[in-house]
Every structure is written in structure tokens, then in C-alpha cells.
Amino acid sequence: MSHALLDIFRNAEVIPVIRTRSIQTAATAVAWLREAGIRIFEITMTVPEATSLIRALSRDPALIVGAGTVPDAATAEACLDAGAKFIVAPWVDPSLSEACRDAGAVLMLGAVTPTEVRAALAAGADAVKIFPASSFGGPGHVKALASVFPGVALCPTGGVDPGNFDAYLDAGAAFVGMGGALVDEKRILAGDKDAIQAAARAVLGQTAA
């Protein structure tokens, strides 16, 4: 049975992948994207003090916060304890499944080939992160995977941007993960809020006010 959160992810279509070199920059990215109307965020474990940020953001019931680039079960448990509703790893790691199942959280494991997608599903994944999507055929590769895995929630990440994310959805992706334009660290550090929110409006199908 499909996890209930997957329907929310499908409706949202895009999950921002927050990967920055400081917790302050990550928090700014989330705040700006939230103002633009985004409510789902993946905070990667490469962000310093990522678990603290997940804990702070998870206090807001309007947000759905998850953890990305989760390296092991202990880290997954710490993130779930902090309030993460989904756990993402860019590889197949069966050790993450039990903690996610016990917490009622979504588990998204990474894969590229059909064999890896099967391994991810066998390891307990509720959705499969296709990463790095742009390096392995882009939307055409996702379309090929979707044809042999009907009903599997595929989430291409890596090289997905406002200009091509529709192509990924048309190819059969359930939703996409997007860093790049949504979490452009140089623009965030420069205070270019307008550029970040313009990218968010583009993926939300909005026009500038």
C-alpha cells in the first residue's frame, strides 16, 4: 500500500533539496521558498547542524520536513526523532528501513538502473530517487524506468530545474527533487531573494506579481 505522504508529494510535484554550507543559508532558503508557497523541504545531512534545523522546522505543522543524504541508520533515527517525515539516501541502504517503518516515515532510496530500482524496493523504499538524473539520460531514462516499474514513485534528482522539470513529470516521474535554481547558494548569500522566489513561482506554475 502506498504511503499517504506520496500523494502529497505528487500534488506538490517538486521537493526542494536544501544543500548549503551553513545552517544560516539553509534556513534562509527555506524561509524564502516558504514565502513563495512551498511547504515540503529535504534538509541534507551535508548542511552543518542539519538535525537542529529539521527539529526547528518540524515544529511548524504547516511544513513537511525530511532528511536527505542520510548515511546510516543511526542518523536516520536522529532525524526521525527530530521530526523528519521522510528519509532520503542517494543509494540503496536496507538498514534505513526499520526506523522509517517504525516512525511511519517515507523512505526514498537512490538508484539509476532497473536492477538498482528493484534492490531499492526490496530494501523497503516507498519511493525511488533516480540520481543523478541528468547524468543518465534525463527524462528519457526516467520514461524507460517508468515503463517497467508502473506504479512505482520515481523521483529524479540532480540537474532538474524549472526548465526541464515538466519533461520529467511527463516522462513518468511522480515528483522531482530540485536544488540548483531553488537553492542557489551564491544568490542566497547575495541576498537575491527575488531570483530564488522567481524560480519557486516557475515550478509552482505562478507568474510574477
Image (spheres, rainbow, N blue to C red):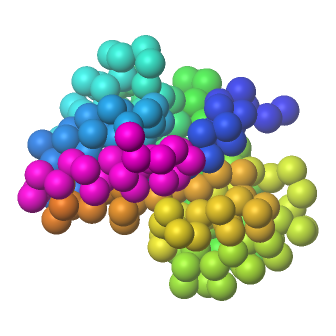
Assign the magenta stretch its main secondary structure: helix
Q: Looking at this view, is 184 or 148 the one in front?
A: 184
Compared with 16, 60 (above or below) is above
Q: Looking at this view, is 105 or 137 the one in front?
A: 137
Q: Where is residue 45 in the image (x, y as percent from the top left)?
A: 31, 50
Q: Position of residue 9 (x, y in %)?
A: 63, 39
Q: Looking at this view, is 167 or 115 the one in front?
A: 167
The residue depicted at 53 percent of the width and 74 percent of the height is 132
Q: Can residue 145 be seen in this view?
A: yes
Q: Is 18 on the left-hand or right-hand side of 141?
A: left
Q: Where is residue 112 in the image (x, y as percent from the top left)?
A: 65, 74
Quadrant of residue 99 in the image? Answer: top right
| Quadrant in which the N terminus is drawn | top right
Quadrant of residue 180 in the image? Answer: bottom left
Q: Give the range drawn in magenta.
A: 189-209
Q: Position of residue 40 (x, y in %)?
A: 47, 36
Compared with 76, 83 (above or below) is above
